[in-house]
Image (tube, helix red, strand yellow):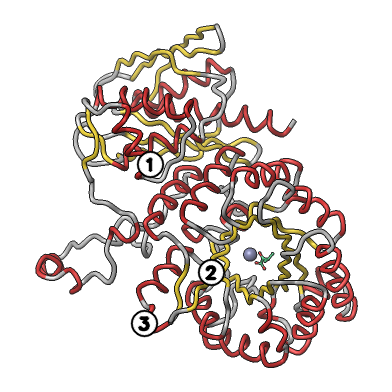
Amino acid sequence: MEKIIKIFDTTLRDGEQSPGCSMNLREKIEMAQQLERMNVDIIEAGFAAASPGDLHSIQEISKSVKNCTVTSLARTHKEDIDKAWESLKYAIKPRIHVFLATSPLHMEYKLKMTEDEVVKRVGEMVAYAKSKCSDIEFSAEDATRSQVDFLARVFDTAIEAGATTINIPDTVGYTTPDEYYNFITEIIEKCPALKTVDISVHCHNDLGLAVANSIAAIKAGATQIECTVNGIGERAGNAALEEIVMALKVRKDLLKADTNIDTKQITRSSNLLTGITGIKVQPNKAIVGANAFAHESGIHQHGVLNKRETYEIMTPESIGLETNRLVLGKHSGRHAFNEKLILLGYNLNQEELDQAFIKFKELTDKKKVVYDRDIDALVSKQKIEIPKTYELEKYVINSGNTITSTTTIAIRKGEEILEEVATGEGPIYAAFKAIEKIIGKEMELDDFSLNSITEGEDALGDAMVKLRENGRAFIGRGLSTDIIESSIIAYINAVNKMIYASKEEK
Ligand code: KIV
Ligand code: ZN
């Protein structure tokens, strides 16, 4: 009988903290709902003391999540713990996550605290958090570079003060699987109280060992793994959720452990995050990379056709990767569309359903066949849509390989229609220039990409535009069967996000 390992997802905290991964409120809520659909056990929704915006977003996530524990990070300060608790007031299952560093390096140079001071602070602040919330996690930051005897003392104190989960993070991604296994085994020997709580690990990927270290920790007795979708996170990122979950599922025979994760939601979670952050995973990335299930060489193709197991250790279906399953078309009605959404795991309210159906009908006018992936793209984009300060009205291009491209664009702003014309190297670049003229501001274009959602000549073009302002990135997405239109929509969406963010901050 395998033991069930709790999955603590920190995509919205450690992940969101990493460069280029910041998300607005709607995006965080949509991501949290997807994490819930995937059935993670704990969602770390943010760090409430970081900003009022963070606190607010944890509250909103707490309101929308029903089945998962929601947690907020806090330093060992009363004000941080108060804010964490305030941010969790709507959570059905709240957890306060308190952390303090325990390595000699961190204590001397960052905290400027002695060992005794650290122990005292941990005892006091865990007890303070416990006076508010029954579910308390304590993390010893930089645990893997801490002295094991001292760490045992800290953990004893935290458990005595009421911690129900103890986290042993490899904060700087320094340890190796064998070393971590021995470290955890030794700490359990030195602090037997650890057997009465959940033991958690949180591995960073600086040496590319985060997943291997997490698996080693499970063998040593860890019962909770902290990880992120696509492995995003500080520096080289955190352990990738999808890799840990599938390693446990595929090698259940060896590892004797599994998770509660609905693995069929993995691909959708990965795609949603990529769509929000604009950060794509490498094609050969395990589980969710574009090539993870592609068989290129003839020998491999032949083998897979004869017997799948020759070269595949798991099925694409097991991670929710369906090969272009035809679903709906021009003649599909509202009922079939609603049924499909339910099957895909979406839970839309009436207004969202109506809007999605209108968009679906518009799509079937342009595209003969509509696949699951088209519906995913359509619905997730709709759910993260923010108020449209600017909206595309129409555009005209004049382009060719012997002339400079000219684009004329008309954009709606409230009741007003604003029109401009610009020239440039290609119609898309000219369109971007025309938009800049309309909004009266030069933009820093950080990234631009175009992909198709499915194959075929009428495939939806998925454009991503990343604009930067004061070091912050704003990602806009645009979907259309016309790639120029999708690029223009993506650019306008990025501008709208910039405006929305400045309003959110006020
Ligand atoms: O990496 C780390 O140590 C952390 C802690 C706050 C858990 O993110
Ligand atoms: Zn971390």
Q: Position of residue 335 (x, y in %)?
A: 31, 30
In the image, 160 versus 84, the foreground residue is 160
Camera-near label (1 vs 3) is 1
Is 464 located above or below residue 268 in the figure? above
Q: Residue furthest top?
A: 416
Counting residues from the N terminus, which is met first, the one under dot 3 or under dot 2?
Answer: 2
The residue lying at 44 percent from left, 17 percent from top is 392
Q: Which residue is mark 2?
A: 205
124 vs 385, left or right, is: right
Closer to the chain start, of discs 2 and 1, is 2
Ligand 1 is found in which quarter of the picture? bottom right
State the image coordinates of residue 136 (x, y, percent, origin top left): 73, 66
Q: Secondary structure at mark 1?
A: helix
Image quadrant containing the N terminus? bottom left
Q: Residue at x 68, y 47 (%)?
A: 58
What's the residue at 56%, 47% (across, down)?
A: 20
Of tags 2 and 1, the one toward the viewer is 1
Q: Residues within 10 Å of mark 3 (few under 14, many from 20)?
A: few
Which circle marks residue 253 in the picture?
A: 3
Q: SS class of the residue under badge 3?
A: helix
Check disc 2: other Cα within 10 Å, few if <14, some if 14-19, many if 20+: many
Residue under numbered circle 1? 342
Residue 403 x %, y % = 28, 19
Marks 3 and 2 sit apart, C-alpha to C-alpha, by: 26 Å
Foreground tag (3 vs 2): 3
Question: What type is the residue that disc 3 sits on?
Answer: Asp
In what quadrant of the picture does the C terminus appear?
top right
- Residue 395, image x, y percentages: 38, 14
Quarter of image, res 41: bottom right
Q: Judge whether 220 appears above or below 474 on screen.
A: below
Distance, label 1 to label 3, CA atoms, is: 33 Å
